[in-house]
């Protein structure tokens, strides 16, 4: 399958000598994006589909392949157990050299997630000299989602976005769980918010 | 009377102009006779001569009045037309009076005016009523009659009005008198002509005249054509005449002139714009393939133009009138344009019957040469319409479409070598062809089809091959392409009209039909399809030369992206390598199977005078290894200087050689799996005799080929089967191996491992065969049907098959399956099979899409189908397939349906 994907690369190296390319419109929408990004995302998608990780799933949300929706299951043995979270991923045009922008769509009470769903996670920030991020091109959608899933169970309380949650996590797990459940909405309850 | 004061002759010219536009002034005053001047009372002196005094003025007035009276009385027209013009005395008197009046300019014009008035009064009173037909529209059937009678009436009237002056002319001899009368006649005739002209409705007159002229010319041309000989000859000698209408008479009565000329011009135009061109003489030249425009030009120059010239000179009374060169050219252009437009109307038919219709196409080419840009657009749009109406619909097979497409290319390249027009008209066909599923495969198959010298397809499957493409490919030249193309910047001669040039006009120049065909599709798609067809083709090839295939791949390499044709090249190399591999292997196999040479044989082969060692070995190399050979040689020969001499010794008696059974001939096709399209990989047990051979080949291949491993694909194998039945022998050449495998299961004489035991009383069921041969039901049934149709097997009971050992056996079934089932299972995987293989992947994609993206419809911009196509390029199916997948997933409980919306569970 992977070979076939390569063969179908949307980057058109040559146009047919007689004009009127039959797939002109088809390629037009893709041409907006960098061909390499599309290619990379297609193969990531293929990997995600063929070897899925339990509790994690993601798929392009529109015909623009650089915007994805993802679904996470809360890890068991954490306050988030049995909860389902929706996220969005937006890939920059220089992906995978820059990290995707990941947001929680489901309201979540978590030390490293703010009220609008932004996530404070080192691998989601660009790396490089003078930068504190830890993004790397070897990471992919699957590993990013896996990291976020594990972040749910192991928050980084050293640099919280939600200070109250960080305090509560250490002091009162029961109260913490109550807050989590109070804030949480299941995807079916969120209909119409999108 | 105001007019009386006009005296100067210089004004007459202005009057002429004036009168040609406006009707003549009407005189209300009767002739001066009504108030005769009988002298002036104050001039008594003359009578008595007493005063020697002559009143000049009064004298002049008296003589004027007297002369006027005499002249007008003589000229007066009476209703009865019986004015006496015979009286010589009266004539002489009138002549004198006229001459007197004529000499004074003022009285001259007065006289002319008076006579014109007299004529007009008479005309409107007595002549005009008989011309009443002109008050109503004139039917064209009646037109000739009306025109003729009008001319007659007017001629008579003219004669009548000229009677008096001509009576004078008959009598007098004096030259000065004659000239006075003659100029009077001329002036009055002009007046009459104007009068006639104004008395008739001008438009109607002109139209009717034009109609009559046209009718006459058309009839004459039609009749002339009946000779029918000029259709065949190179020139058209049809004549146009218009004898039934005298142009001279028209001119005489004043209906010639501008009006007549205009009418004639209309008629000529109409003639050229129709009947003159639509004759059999200028039919499409189906036999000579030449344009008829030259013939048309010839006809116009030699026949038509002189006729027009003649008519015009009659009509205008100007004998020296001549048509100019440019006018004749205009006639030719007009006719050629008409011819072209007419041809354009059935251009589609000509395209269809190309190349026999070359003549017609050349006509259109001439038309475009004469015509303007709009004519080019006309040809294009007209042809496009014809295409849409008659051709681009579901009832036309793709073969036909392709054939016509090729014809269109030929035709329009002839019309316009630069391909600009072609680009315009070909677009709809191209788009339509692209929409057809089978176009690519037909093109690919056509490229590979064998064509014999007569242009017929050699092998079957004619419905999948477009003969024209095959011929075109056979014709196209590889080398031709080398120096042409966009890069030839030195070609200074060729520039299209800027307005005609498409954005890629440079590249469209040198492309031949093959290039147009290849350009129909995206290169990648096309190459993929070609690779598939080529793979099928190569697998079925018997000939091991692959000349045609090599040529084809080379052709593609020059035309398409050479790097993308790697797969095709590898495939070709594979089959070639396989051929040589088979040769080698067969030799090796021969070593094994041929009994090694015996010492006695070798001894017998050594001549007394000796033989070089190598030479001797060559004779025995077939079956004897070198070491064996050396051992034997030591035994039977003496060696000196590498030359062997026979030893004189007795050899021990030999044991009789055991005959080994001959192996079946076994050929191998090694395919590099990565480069060949995905093949059927159904596995099953091949006839047991194959296994040792396969193993043998595998090991050998591994010794030769390094890293590569052989993986047998029995689904692609073909075999030749010979069956020995009780009463006959059956030989089936080159059938799929599963058929061989199945019939092998029914064999009665076999040695080693038997997958299933057949005995004629119990027979075998398909299920048994499927289990024993580990073969799909589809293949088993195909094989059983095949052998049943060949009357090798029969159903001894429903679902149980047995061998029909002798044909006269009672098969128990009346109906015979006579026809052989078509070879329905192709080697390359079908779209459907690919879909089935990939269905799980597709389902996962759909499930994830719905889980993350919420509920979706199947169709639409953001529907499941289009999303799937976007994220998964291998998904090349439609909504039906998605529907099918969703239904299956619903069955497994993975998705739910809510109206048109599907969502994940």
Image (cartoon, grey):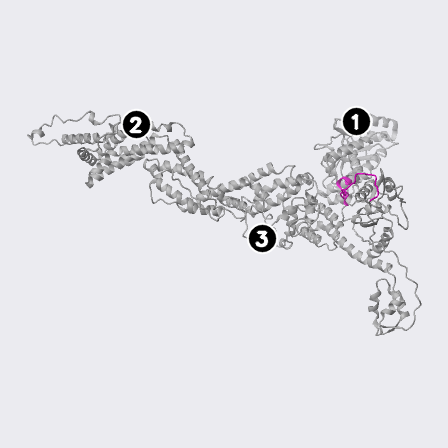
Report the residue marked by disc 2: B126
Instruction: Depth check: give the residue in front, B847 or B519.
Output: B519
- For label 2, the crowd category at 10 Å Cα-Cα, with few meaning under 14, some 14 to 19 and many 20 or more, is some
User: Label 2 marks which chain's residue?
Assistant: B
Q: Position of residue B531 (x, y in %)?
A: 72, 47
Q: Quadrant of residue B191?
A: top left
Tell me how many marks there are: 3
Which of the image's four quarters has the C terminus of chain B? top right
Q: Position of residue B885 (x, y in %)?
A: 78, 34
Q: Give the magenta-colored segment's residue range.
A: B808-834
- For label 3, the crowd category at 10 Å Cα-Cα, with few meaning under 14, some 14 to 19 and many 20 or more, is few
Q: CA distance from mark 3 to mark 1?
A: 67 Å
Secondary structure beneath dot 3 equals loop
Secondary structure beneath dot 1 equals helix
Q: CA distance from mark 2 to mark 1?
A: 106 Å
Marks 3, 1: nearer the viewer: 3
Give the numbered dot on residue A188.
1
Q: Both on one chain, marks 3 and 1? A: no
């Amino acid at each position: 399958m992977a070979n076939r994907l390569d063969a179908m690369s949307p980057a058109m190296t040559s146009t047919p000598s007689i004009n009127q390319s039959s797939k002109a419109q088809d390629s037009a929408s893709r041409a907006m994006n960098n061909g390499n990004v599309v290619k990379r995302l297609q193969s990531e998608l293929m990997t995600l589909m063929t070897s899925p990780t339990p509790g994690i799933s993601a798929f392009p949300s529109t015909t623009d392949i650089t915007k994805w929706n993802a679904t996470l299951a809360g890890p068991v043995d954490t306050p988030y157990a049995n909860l389902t979270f929706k996220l969005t991923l937006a890939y920059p045009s220089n992906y995978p050299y820059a990290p995707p922008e990941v947001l929680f769509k489901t309201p979540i009470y978590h030390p490293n997630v703010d009220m609008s769903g932004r996530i404070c996670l080192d691998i989601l920030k660009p790396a490089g000299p003078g930068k504190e991020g830890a993004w790397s091109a070897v990471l992919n959608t699957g590993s990013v989602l896996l990291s976020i899933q594990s972040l749910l169970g192991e928050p980084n309380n050293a640099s919280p976005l939600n200070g109250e949650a960080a305090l509560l996590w250490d002091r009162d797990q029961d109260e913490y769980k109550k807050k989590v459940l109070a804030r949480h909405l299941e995807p079916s309850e969120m209909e119409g918010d999108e | 009377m105001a007019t009386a004061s006009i005296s100067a002759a210089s004004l007459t010219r202005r009057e002429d102009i004036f009168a040609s536009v406006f009707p003549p002034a009407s005189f209300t005053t009767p002739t001066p006779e009504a108030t005769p001047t009988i002298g002036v009372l104050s001039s008594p002196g003359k009578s008595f001569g007493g005063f020697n005094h002559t009143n000049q003025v009064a004298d002049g007035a008296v003589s004027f009045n007297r002369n006027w009276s005499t002249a007008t009385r003589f000229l007066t027209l009476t209703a009865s037309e019986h004015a006496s013009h015979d009286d010589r005395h009266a004539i002489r008197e009138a002549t004198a009076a006229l001459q007197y009046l004529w000499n004074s300019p003022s009285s001259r014009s007065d006289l002319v005016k008076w006579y014109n008035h007299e004529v007009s009064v008479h005309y409107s009173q007595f002549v005009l009523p008989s011309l009443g037909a002109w008050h109503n529209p004139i039917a064209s059937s009646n037109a000739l009659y009306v025109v003729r009678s009008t001319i007659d009436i007017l001629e008579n009237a003219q004669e009548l009005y000229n009677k008096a002056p001509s009576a004078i002319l008959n009598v007098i001899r004096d030259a000065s008198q004659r000239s006075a009368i003659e100029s009077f006649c001329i002036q009055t005739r002009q007046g009459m002509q104007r009068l006639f002209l104004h008395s008739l409705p001008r438009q109607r007159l002109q139209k009717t005249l034009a109609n009559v002229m046209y009718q006459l010319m058309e009839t004459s041309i039609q009749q002339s054509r009946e000779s029918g000989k000029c259709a065949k000859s190179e020139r058209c000698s049809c004549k146009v005449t218009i004898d039934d209408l005298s142009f001279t008479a028209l001119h005489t009565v004043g209906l010639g002139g501008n009006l007549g000329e205009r009418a004639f011009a209309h008629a000529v135009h109409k003639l050229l714009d129709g009947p003159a061109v639509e004759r059999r003489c200028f039919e499409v030249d189906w036999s000579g393939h030449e344009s008829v425009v030259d013939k048309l030009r010839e006809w116009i120059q030699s026949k038509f133009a002189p006729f027009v010239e003649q008519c015009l000179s009659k009509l205008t009374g100007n004998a020296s009138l001549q048509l100019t060169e440019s006018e004749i050219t205009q006639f030719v252009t007009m006719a050629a344009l008409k011819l072209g437009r007419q041809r354009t109307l059935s251009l589609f038919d000509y395209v269809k019957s190309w190349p026999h219709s070359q003549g017609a196409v050349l006509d259109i080419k001439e038309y475009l040469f004469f015509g303007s840009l709009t004519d080019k657009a006309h040809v294009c749009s007209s042809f496009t319409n014809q295409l849409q109406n008659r051709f681009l619909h579901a009832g036309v097979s793709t073969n036909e479409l392709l054939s016509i497409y090729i014809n269109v290319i030929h035709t329009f390249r002839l019309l316009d070598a630069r391909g600009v027009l072609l680009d315009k008209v070909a677009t709809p066909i191209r788009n339509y062809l692209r929409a057809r599923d089978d176009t690519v495969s037909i093109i690919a198959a056509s490229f590979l089809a064998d064509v014999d010298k007569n242009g017929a397809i050699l092998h079957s499957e004619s419905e999948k091959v477009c003969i024209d493409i095959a011929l075109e490919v056979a014709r196209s030249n590889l080398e031709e392409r080398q120096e042409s193309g966009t890069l030839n910047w030195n070609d200074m001669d060729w520039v299209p009209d800027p307005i005609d040039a498409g954005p890629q006009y440079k590249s469209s120049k040198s492309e031949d039909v093959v290039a147009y065909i290849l350009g129909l599709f995206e290169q990648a798609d096309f190459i993929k399809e070609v690779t598939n067809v080529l793979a099928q083709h190569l697998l079925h090839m018997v000939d091991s030369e692959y000349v045609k295939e090599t040529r084809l791949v080379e052709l593609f390499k020059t035309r398409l992206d050479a790097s993308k044709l790697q797969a095709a090249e590898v495939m070709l190399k594979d089959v070639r390598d396989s051929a040589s591999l088979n040769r080698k292997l067969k030799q090796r196999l021969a070593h094994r199977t041929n009994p090694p040479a015996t010492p006695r044989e070798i001894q017998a082969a050594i001549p007394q005078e000796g033989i070089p060692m190598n030479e001797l070995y060559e004779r025995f190399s077939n079956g004897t290894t070198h070491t064996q050979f050396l051992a034997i040689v030591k035994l039977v020969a003496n060696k000196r200087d590498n030359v062997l001499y026979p030893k004189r010794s007795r050899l021990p008696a030999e044991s009789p050689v055991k005959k080994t059974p001959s192996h079946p001939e076994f050929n191998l096709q090694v395919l590099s799996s990565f480069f060949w399209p995905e093949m059927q990989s159904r596995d099953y047990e091949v006839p047991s005799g194959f296994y040792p051979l396969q193993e043998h080949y595998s090991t050998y291949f591994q010794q030769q080929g390094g890293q590569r491993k052989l993986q047998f694909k029995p689904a692609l194998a073909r075999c030749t089967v010979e069956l020995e039945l009780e009463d006959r022998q059956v030989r089936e050449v080159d059938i799929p191996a599963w058929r061989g495998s199945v019939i092998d299961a029914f064999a009665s004489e076999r040695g080693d491992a038997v997958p299933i035991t057949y005995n004629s009383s119990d027979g075998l069921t398909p299920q048994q065969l499927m289990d024993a041969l580990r073969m799909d039901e589809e293949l088993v049934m195909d094989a059983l049907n095949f052998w049943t149709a060949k009357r090798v097997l029969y159903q001894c009971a429903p679902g149980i098959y047995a061998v029909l050992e002798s044909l006269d056996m009672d098969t128990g079934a009346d109906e015979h399956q006579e026809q052989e089932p078509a070879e329905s299972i192709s080697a390359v995987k079908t779209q459907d099979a690919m879909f089935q293989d990939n269905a799980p992947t597709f389902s996962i994609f759909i499930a994830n899409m719905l889980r993350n993206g919420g509920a979706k419809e199947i169709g639409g911009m953001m529907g499941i189908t289009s999303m799937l196509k976007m994220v998964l390029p291998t998904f090349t199916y439609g909504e039906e397939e998605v529907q099918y997948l969703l239904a299956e997933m619903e069955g497994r409980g993975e998705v739910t349906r809510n109206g048109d919306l599907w969502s994940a569970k």
